[in-house]
Image (cartoon, rainbow, N blue to C red):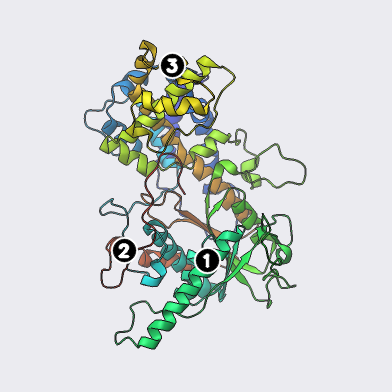
Amino acid sequence: MPGVPAGPVTSRVLRGAAMAAAPPPTPHLQPHLEQSPEQRRAADIIRLLTLYRPLLDAFVIDFFTDGLWAQLPPAWQPALASATPVQLAGLLGGHGGPGAAWPLSLLAFAAAARALAFPRGCPGGSPRPPCQSSHLHPLLRRHVKPKKQHEIQRLGKLLKRLSQATGCQRVVDIGAGQGHLSRFLAFGLGLSVTAVESDGRLVGLAERFDQELLWELGKNRGLGHKRPPRHPLTPRAPQHVAGRLDPAAPWGEFLLPPNPPGPGPAARNPLGGLGGSEDGEQVLVTGLHACGDLSPALLCHFARSPAVAAVALVGCCYMKLSTTPQPAGCPLGYPMSTSVAALPGHQLSYRAREAACHALEEYEGRLRGGSPHLRAHCYRAVLESLIRAADPAKRHLGLQPGRKAHALSFPQYAQLGLPLAGLDPAGVPLDSGAVGAMLEQQHKVVAFCTLGQLLAPAVETLILLDRLLYLREQGFHCALVPLFDPRFSPRNLVLVAARTPLATVLAGLDKDSEDRDSSQDEDLGEAESPREGQSPHSPGHRP
């Protein structure tokens, strides 16, 4: 790989791997200190990413057009070319692989990447998808996919602990969507919830779901059930507000009208007032998979508004973050902290931030199972080569020939994809020897993707470290918690921050996590079929 000679890489990465192999630092609750473990980890990640930036910034669809395989360190190429998918899964997960003989420099690279990434948590038990959660009232499972049930139940319990620790009963859920989390917090946990969503259609849907639940509660009370429900609900619906977050406005004026504006009058900001809330009380703020710049904006509002007692945030879509250069006065989504901004080489390309959204555990599972989904990247790389040969100006067109590309032959796939690029399939030789030779290199494409997957968690860790350090620099108490099962919810790290110590909040999470295994089993006594099925697995990034 250009600029990455094998000898220096081996020694430098080995030193990094030896240093990083020590147990990862426990999140500190004391104020920011110079040269904290988090600062050192950020610097180490940037050094590692700098060494392998050509690998990190490469687009897999350019595998053939840019000759990406030849750019790998020569010592790696024979081992990777002969590796089976199961052996690649062992390299990715650090679990070894039958008969694999990896070069020492490749092992050091993989060890350093794994050690520098935040522990994502992977509880034991069967890796099957979650079923209906017995830890949610059956009425709260309606319209909610099992993955989302897992997330709202876990995040809801964390917010309840934050409420008890801070004395705040009011929660503001930003980017609330259809209101699933808000509904659980209000009806299930008895909190006062304001749900803010920019899409007016989703606001209307959320309000409809609330009314359905209230009607069911009234009906059940009228019937007078003999056996009390396992998870009783309170008839306290969340308040829904259509609006967009203004990252530059004061907290009391932080909402903009929805886009597009709704048919009715603009809702009054429920958080207005000098105290930062309608009644002057403090609030908790949360965002479940707050996309792109929404996560940094929420952290900035928390940092400058005493009305916000604490925040619990799960980010996603890192490729949408605002980075340099930006017009004067426009806040950056990355970097946020002065610590990371001061480090040479901290910049992350669009491709690197997109890689941070990948589902590593899912990809490892596909490798171990020899999933046909693995051929999709090779198909797209071959298609890119054909498109560029026909018209060099057509590059990275963002084509999506179909969600089930893995189930097609390549000619079928190309017949769908070439017209999307404005090309006639009849004029492109799909059965040529050159196409066949590229398709025979699928195993190399899979191996190259595996190397990118190894770096992805380290990139996500750097982005989240930057946010944590931004808060530490201002004296807040904060921690990153692997709250969700990463096999089903890849963006599983929750950033928790407060103006008071978090020790009691974090100490109780281990007990709450005991529901993880039992929530895999469907409670047939209470559950009813959801109105939406479980979402299918798909390649690429997942929230």
Q: Which one is nearer the viewer's eye here, 275 or 187? A: 187
* Residue under label 3: 70
Above/below status of 299 relative to 217: above
Question: Measured from the top left, where is residue 104 in percent x and y?
Answer: 35, 26
The kind of residue tagged 1 is: Ala
**Around disc 2, counting alpha carbons within 10 Å, would you say few (fewer than 14), some (14 to 19), or many (20 or more)?**
many
Farthest residue in the left direction? Answer: 98
Residue 189 appears anywhere in the view: no
Q: Residue 520's quadrant in the figure?
A: bottom left
Instruction: Tell me the element at label 1.
Output: helix
Instruction: Tell me the element at label 2.
Output: loop
* Residue under label 2: 519
Instruction: Tell me the element at label 3.
Output: helix
Marks 1 and 3 sit apart, C-alpha to C-alpha, by 52 Å
Q: Which one is nearer the viewer's eye here, 204 or 234? A: 204
Say which of marks 1 and 3 sits in front.
Answer: 1
Say which of marks 1 and 2 sits in front.
Answer: 1
Q: Is residue 276 left or right of residue 425?
A: right
**Around disc 3, counting alpha carbons within 10 Å, would you say few (fewer than 14), some (14 to 19), or many (20 or more)?**
few
Q: Are marks 3 and 2 in contact (CB under 8 Å)?
A: no
Q: Is residue 409 left or right of residue 213?
A: left
The kind of residue tagged 2 is: Ser
Marks 3 and 2 sit apart, C-alpha to C-alpha, by 47 Å
* Residue under label 1: 206
Question: Measured from the top left, where is residue 147 in percent x and y?
Answer: 39, 56
The kind of residue tagged 3 is: Ala
